[in-house]
Amino acid sequence: MVDDFRHVRFCAWNGMIFMAVFILFWGVMGHNIPPWAGDLPAKVVADWFRAEQNIIRTGMVISMTFTVCYCVWGLAIGKVMRHVTGPHSILLELQIWGAGLTVVPVLVSNSFWLAGAYRPEALPDETLQMLYDLAWLLIDLGYSVTSVQMIALGVGFLQDKREQPLMPKWVCWYSIWVGFMFTAECLMPFFKTGPFARQGILNYWIEFSIFFIYAPIITWYILKAIPRLEREVADAGARA
Amino acid sequence: MQAQGLKRAGLPGDPGLWVFILADMTAFALFFLLFTLGRMGDPALFEQSRLALDPAFGIANTLILLTSSWMMVQAVEAVRTGSRRRALLFLVLTIGIGLGFAVTKIVEYAGKIQAGITMLTNDFFMYYFAFTGIHFLHFVIGIGALLVTLAKARSAPMDDGMRRWTESVGCYWHMVDLLWIMLFPMLYLQRLS
């Protein structure tokens, strides 16, 4: 059966669609760039929910709608990756499952912010603060599923024996490193201020930045790999 | 002597690994900067907290990691020359000596926790536990990679692939060593000027 790449480019672009929507609707409209600091009084967060409930609702609804793009992106990566690892590699499955499961913490944490914005006038300040905290705890501590995707992707593409690999070695190692670096999120629940807090230099600015750089790099090389694979498949077909 | 005469690349190990090492070193450089800024903000607290650390643990860990790294150099050289027995011997020594780091670190952590000192005690100990903890995670991964290397060295052909793998693990292990050499004086020795 001939490998079909017809829709893979579109699926690969879903990574960028996810990023754009995430930054604009979750980040800007959801007041998550940067988030409210962990040491702020409950009233600050509660007043924000009440004053901007429709902006938050819109941001989270659109963010939730497009979260699935991350999974679609992971499947596009998998489509390319199988030409390196073979179709039966556990690394291939880990990459796809990691991308698929990344949707869960993003989706569920978005629903907590949405819940806060649903009837904020009827909820006490501490309850709204708890929803905000809960969302951040989940989105940060759900890192491990994404780490699985990143490490599997890096290790998998490192196996490429082509003279010019589909994914450069440095990108593979960068992927492994980003997946590894996410472990620093484990420190986040212990601090409300400082570099490890959810708004801190390490656990927010650095961790999110290396992820925001990561996704476009991977997408770029996946898009470059697709025409090469199309030629490889066509050449193999012509020889057969 | 299969590995003799193999073409040597400019960088030891997988060239891409150096991206990981560079990125990691950059992250630790940022850690050191944050610590320095924190120290500038409250020098008295940092000095008082530093005195609660026992430099003997730091010195012991430095010597352990340096010796282990030295054994790793011998192991890499053995793989390069295709000497399986020497490679196995030096890998066992690298791991065995390296595990001493885990022992001293666990004893040191346990002592601090028993004395009621945790990463929530103050900013100095936040950095101390966080940075040495992240470094310890690097160490654990390094031990895992060394164990894989040991398993490979028992039966895998001593070819170019094995050389590249062993060099890569060696580079990583030296990075663990180097990071500690920077953490040790920063946390244990740096006095109030």
Image: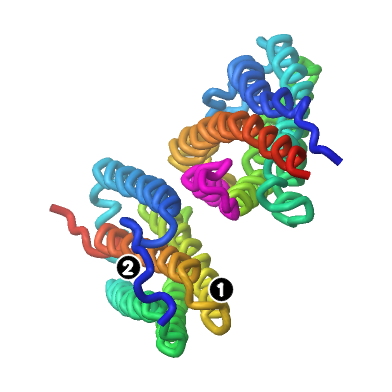
- The reply to whether dot 2 and dot 1 touch (C-beta < 8 Å) is no
Label 1 is placed on what type of residue? Val
**Among the 4 quarters of the image, the one containing residue A25:** top right
| Quadrant of the frame with the N terminus of chain A | top right
Name the residue at 27% across, 57% down.
B186
Dot 1 falls on which chain? B
Number of other residues with Cα within 10 Å of mark 2, as a class: few under 14, some 14 to 19, many 20 or more? some
Q: Secondary structure at mark 1?
A: helix
Name the residue at 73% across, 27% down.
A11
Q: Are marks 2 and 1 on the same chain?
A: yes
**Among the 4 quarters of the image, the one containing residue B181:** bottom left
The residue identified by callout 1 is B148
Residue A21, given in percent of the width and then of the height, sits at 66, 19
Residue A183, given in percent of the width and then of the height, sits at 56, 51
User: Count the marks: how many?
Assistant: 2
Instruction: Measure how far apart labels 2 and 1 are at the Cα level.
Output: 34 Å
| Quadrant of the frame with the C terminus of chain A | top right
Q: Nearer the viewer, residue B151 or B178?
A: B151
Dot 2 falls on which chain? B
**Among the 4 quarters of the image, the one containing residue B128:** bottom left
Of the numbered discs in the image, which one, if any, rests on residue B53? 2
Number of other residues with Cα within 10 Å of mark 1, as a class: few under 14, some 14 to 19, many 20 or more? few
Left or right of B51? Residue A162 is right
Residue A199, given in percent of the width and then of the height, sits at 51, 33
Magenta span of residues: A158-183
